[in-house]
Image (tube, rainbow, N blue to C red):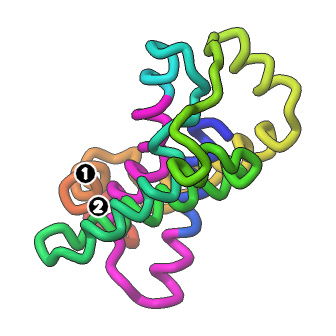
Amino acid sequence: MFALGELGIGLGLAWLVSRRNRSAVDFRLVLLGSILPDLIDKPLGAVLHLDARLWAHSLVFLAGILLLSLLPALRGLRWVGFGDAVHLLVDLIWQQPQVMLWPFLGLAFPPGEQSFGGYLQVLLTDPYVQFGEIVGGAILIATAWHYRLYTGTALKRFLKDGRLVEPTAAYE
């Protein structure tokens, strides 16, 4: 999956969790976690001539984030972990057990060459990726519209505390 799918689906699932459990979610951290594996692994993979899915796409990486979130000062990392878990799910990472279960199946990662043309080809030909990008993009647009994140006031508030606050006349 690509960025729109990862970000939008991560945001949408976190929103559902927040509605169901009435828990305060820092959606900024969810969004960060939703793309964090790609922010780490794609550049490293390009430099090392490896696949785009490396250490940050492993369950060990996710477990590390969640273990750190047990520390009181780092509790917010649980939302990064939530976003990371969604990323692994939408990436169908279980189809690459050597990556998902790293280092338990060996220390090596698959070789690979990344290119803009390769990513574009996947986007144009893979229905799963296309569907994810459409759904994720729609969720992002609907969220921005509903919570009026296109206004300076609402966007500043979101960037400050990561909450999605129901719009009021104050945002007009």
Q: Name the spot of residue 65 as percent of width and height, x first.
A: 34, 61
Q: Is residue 169 magenta?
A: no
Horizontal side of 133 relative to 6 (left or right) equals: right
- SS at badge 2: loop
Mark 2 residue type: Gly
Horizontal side of 27 relative to 95 (left or right) equals: left
Q: Badge 2 is on which residue? A: 162
Q: Which mark is residue 159?
A: 1
Mark 1 residue type: Leu
Q: Does residue 7 show up?
A: no
**Range shown magenta:** 14-41
**Where is 58 relative to 22, above or below?**
above
What secondary structure is the magenta-colored segment mainly? helix
Name the residue: 21% across, 62% down. 161
- SS at badge 1: helix
Horizontal side of 25 relative to 46 (left or right) equals: left
